[in-house]
Amino acid sequence: MIKIKSLAEIQIMAEGGKILAKIMKELEKMVRPGITTKELDRTAEALILKSGGKCSFKGYEGFPACLCTSINEEIVHAIPSERKLKEGDIISLDLGILYKGFHSDMAITVPVGKIDPEKARLIRVTKKALKRGIKKVRLGNTFGDIGNTIQRYVESQGFNVVRDLCGHGIGKELHEDPKIPNYGKRHSGPEIKEGMVFCIEPMVTVGDWKIKKTKDGFGYETADGSLSCHFEHMVTVIKNGCKVLTELK
């Protein structure tokens, strides 16, 4: 069942989303060659605790860290370690915060130093796919309209969308109904209604969309070893469209 949030609940989630966006901005500034993903994780946790929140991911289904740090072919949920970032890498930072009883969730992909043009294009396309998906969030549309728009744009650019991972509803639970695939048919799936809060998160690959587990047992990577990119925003549905709760304005 898709939960409809009250105005008071949405306001709390907006506060949490803004805190999360500020923390993500600080983490983005730290990304550079030579830094370890563990350092990024320690900073993320310290900033969340300082804000009065808690880590959404730490302990979730046994996940041992606060921040997901997925590099190059890794798609999502890779565990931070002593691995150092290298010039030319791209890294996805995925972070959740529990604030006043409600979760917020977002992700960005960041270049490490100077990257090649294809990696830069992958980041641009994935970011634009998210924007296009968000534009489909309005009363009367369906979740299939979001996925279809993301898929058509990504594939028009010569890339693929991951099929086995998806966006999700969010609130008192980190993952709530509905599941929101990044592919699909127009006018399919549940109808978008006012008061819904959910996360849209295109995961895009340069090669095939098939995935496999990473060696750490938590993360996912492309089965063919091709590059992957991930962006995510949390949005709420309002009368005249939607509001993004995890961005700074």
Image (cartoon, rainbow, N blue to C red):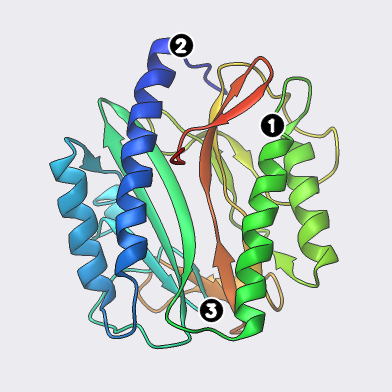
Chain-order first, disc 3 or disc 1: 3
Identify the residue position indicated by label 3 in the image: 73
**Mark 2: few, some, or many residues within 10 Å (few <14, many ≥20)?**
few
Q: Residue at x 69, y 63 (%)?
A: 125
Q: Could you give the CA–CA distance between mark 2 and mark 3, rounded to whole angstroms?
A: 39 Å
Identify the residue position indicated by label 2 in the image: 6
Image location of residue 233, percent across then percent down: 52, 44
Chain-order first, disc 2 or disc 3: 2
Whether residue 71 appears in this view of the structure is yes
- Callout 3, which amino acid? Glu
Identify the residue position indicated by label 1 in the image: 137
Q: Are marks 3 and 1 in contact (CB under 8 Å)?
A: no
Tell me: 188 left or right of 212: right
- Callout 1, which amino acid? Val
Image location of residue 116, percent across then percent down: 59, 86
Tell me: 118 left or right of 198: right
Q: Secondary structure at mark 2?
A: loop
